[in-house]
Image: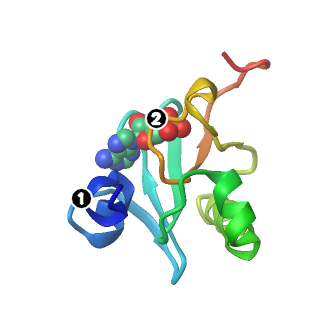
Amino acid sequence: MNATTDCLFCRIVAGDVPADLVRATDDTLAFRDVAPQAPTHVLVIPREHHRDIAALASSDPALAGRVIADATQMAAELDLAEFRLVLNTGPSAGQSVFHVHAHVMAGREFSWPPG
Ligand code: AMP
């Protein structure tokens, strides 16, 4: 796969696909999910292409840490006292976009176990 042209989230990073941006750092972007599953639903991604959190954590654990740190920082900036942080990893776990992303969801009650 050519990450820059074939990956939807790489195209968002490149500015070729529009996104509702919430926060940007040198390493990460946070933007609102197009199909929100909660009143607040933001995706936090590294600008660099990595397929999923397992691939990212194995090739660049510091960047994996910054994705999580930036997700929690973004939650604080949005005044989200409580939220759910999800990284679907692989199709059977619900991953549909293969550029690692952390879902930050808040504003409603969440059940457990997730479906
Ligand atoms: P996952 O199923 O964990 O891979 O999550 C992918 C998420 O990306 C889904 O929640 C989609 O609604 C979301 N999504 C797909 N296309 C876009 C887009 N262009 N902008 C923002 N979110 C998107």
Q: Which quarter holds ligand 1?
A: top left
**Residue 77 image position (x, y, % from top left):** 62, 66
**Residue tagged 2:** 96
Q: Is mark 2 within 8 Å of ligand 1?
A: yes
User: Outermost residue toward the front?
Assistant: 1
**Residue 76 image position (x, y, % from top left):** 68, 62
**Residue tagged 1:** 18
User: Outermost residue toward the left?
Assistant: 16
- Dot 2 and dot 1 residues touching (CB under 8 Å): no
Is residue 68 among what the camera can see? no
Please tell me which residue lies in front, 45 or 55: 55
Q: What residue appears at the point 47 percent right and 46 percent down from the top-left corner?
A: 98
The relative height of residue 97 versus residue 54 in the rendered view (above or below) is above
Q: Is mark 1 within 8 Å of ligand 1?
A: yes
Q: What residue appears at the point 74 percent right and 50 percent down from the top-left corner?
A: 81
Front label number (2 vs 1): 2
Tell me the CA gap for discs 2 and 1. 19 Å
Position of 69 with respect to 46 (left or right) is right
Amino acid type, callout 1: Pro
Please tell me which residue lies in front, 107 or 25: 25
